[in-house]
Image: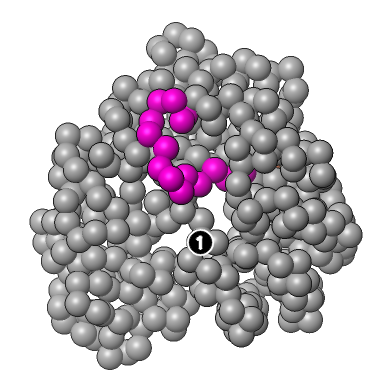
């Protein structure tokens, strides 16, 4: 059987952060039951679409899924496990706001089946947290990590860098504090300014909210150096882990071109049908690759499930070109890179050898047999590098 992962999007947040452009809505507790029921029904539709599969991950993302009642988390996990065949090392992860993390919630999530917690720390610096419009402070973030590592088998601290006013010293303090908490995984995301957000509007008025590109690259370089010196491997552009087991298996599914059901308002999914797909191996890619997007607004999603039995709003068959490009754009983000034969198999054409040689010579690419990956230097210019390879 092929593998599948399950992404469940919980779109509500207690408040909206000024830089966030995800599909999010102000939290309404009265809609929790209706949305959970819709997600449960949608899951059955996805099972009909995918057929029997090995379930390798369940990921609760958002929004703020730590606002979900633990009993709802448990019902969703149980349902997924009853529809697909859970693998022995099934990853069950949840993204949590530090404010929702306490001994009681951690024990309840653990009992519900969560084994990996990804905590949106962003920073431990109170000035940074205020600037980013967060509703927690540094002390609360430290306490959340401290408790989480005691109770959860795997914990990730998610940090943001590149906000206007950030200094190397502040970043260093954030990294050191995260590492001192004994988490096994750290994500460092660059603050990007999206037009429709409050930060985007401020930038339009001439108020800078992020540092310039050069400064951001320096901060990123500093993060990589600091984390790798302490034994965190940069297995993906923004993700660092202490061991292989600490890596996010769900996110690896995205980066390796695997299949995942995208359930909940606005969730994206990918499904290979009518053929075989084997993640991490060289070939076996046949059939069609479907790209789905669920109805965006929670009420529209609930109505869609009620009227049609599923929440999918758009479903398109990716062309061979789009499928192959996505495979490279996602796959080159990870240290392991992509399989050239797989790209060729999907697209029907090979990446030009001269280009590979040219960028290998320039120190941006490295090739080992069939596997092509970006060097640390190449990862700094990854988008441009991939565009060149795909021309
Ligand atoms: S950054 Fe996280 S908590 Fe803030 S609005 Fe976005 S999803 Fe919600």
Residue range corresponding to the magenta coloring: 80-94
User: Residue 143, how many percent across, how many down?
Assistant: 84, 56
Magenta stretch: includes residue 276: no
The image quarter containing residue 129 is bottom right
Which residue occupies the foreground of this view, 354 or 73? 73
Question: Badge 1: how crowded within 10 Å, few (<14), some, or many (20+)?
Answer: few
Residue 295 can be seen in this image: no
User: What percent of the width, then of the height, locates residue 207?
Assistant: 75, 62
Q: Nearer the viewer, residue 114 or 23?
A: 114
Q: Quadrant of residue 170?
A: bottom right
- SS assignment for the magenta stretch, majority: strand
Q: Say whether residue 27 is visible.
A: yes
Assign a secondary structure to mark 1.
helix
Q: Which residue lies at the image location 41% right of the left edge and 13% below the top edge? A: 309
* Residue 198 x %, y %: 71, 48
Residue shown at the point (55%, 61%) measured from the top left:
246
Q: Residue at x 19, y 77 (%)?
A: 369
Residue at mark 1: 245
Q: Nearer the viewer, residue 211 or 186?
A: 186
Q: Quadrant of residue 367?
A: bottom left
Is the N terminus in the top left, top right, bottom left or bottom right quadrant? Answer: top left
Is 94 placed above or below 245 here?
above
Q: Residue furthest left?
A: 348
Q: Is residue 111 left or right of residue 381?
A: right
Figure check: 325 above or below 57: below
| 81 falls in the magenta region | yes
């Amino acid at each position: 059987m092929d593998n599948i992962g399950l992404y469940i999007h919980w779109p509500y947040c207690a408040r909206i952060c000024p830089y966030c452009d995800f599909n999010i809505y102000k939290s309404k507790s009265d809609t929790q039951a209706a949305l959970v029921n819709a997600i449960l029904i949608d899951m059955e539709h996805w099972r009909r679409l995918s057929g029997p599969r090995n379930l390798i991950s369940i990921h609760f993302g958002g929004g703020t899924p730590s606002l979900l009642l633990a009993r709802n988390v448990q019902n969703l996990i149980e349902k997924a496990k009853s529809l697909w065949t859970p693998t022995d090392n099934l990853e069950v992860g949840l993204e949590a706001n530090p404010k929702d993390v306490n001994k009681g919630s951690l024990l309840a999530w653990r009992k519900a089946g969560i084994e990996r917690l990804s905590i949106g720390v962003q920073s431990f610096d109170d000035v940074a947290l205020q600037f980013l419009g967060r509703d927690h402070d540094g002390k609360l973030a430290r306490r959340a990590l401290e408790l989480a590592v005691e109770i959860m088998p795997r914990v990730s601290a998610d940090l943001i860098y590149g906000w206007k006013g950030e200094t190397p010293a502040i970043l260093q303090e954030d990294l050191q504090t995260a590492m001192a908490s004994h988490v096994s995984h750290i994500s460092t995301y660059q603050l990007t300014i999206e037009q429709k957000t409050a930060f985007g509007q401020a930038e339009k008025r001439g108020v800078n909210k992020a540092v310039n590109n050069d400064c951001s690259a320096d901060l990123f370089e500093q993060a990589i150096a600091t984390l790798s010196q302490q034994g965190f491997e940069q297995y993906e552009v923004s993700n660092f882990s202490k061991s292989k087991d600490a890596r996010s298996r769900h996110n690896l599914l995205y980066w390796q071109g695997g299949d995942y059901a995208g359930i909940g308002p606005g969730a994206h999914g990918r499904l290979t049908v009518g053929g075989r797909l084997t993640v991490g191996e060289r070939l076996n890619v046949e059939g069609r690759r479907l790209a789905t997007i669920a109805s965006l607004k929670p009420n529209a999603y609930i109505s869609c499930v009620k009227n049609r039995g599923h929440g999918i709003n758009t479903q398109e068959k990716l062309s061979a070109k789009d499928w192959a490009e996505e495979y490279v754009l996602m796959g080159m983000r990870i240290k392991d890179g992509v399989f050239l034969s797989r790209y060729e198999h999907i697209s029907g054409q090979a990446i030009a050898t001269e280009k590979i040689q040219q960028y290998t010579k320039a120190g941006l690419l490295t090739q080992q047999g069939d596997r092509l990956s970006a060097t640390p230097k190449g990862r700094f210019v990854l988008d441009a590098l991939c565009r060149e390879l795909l021309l």
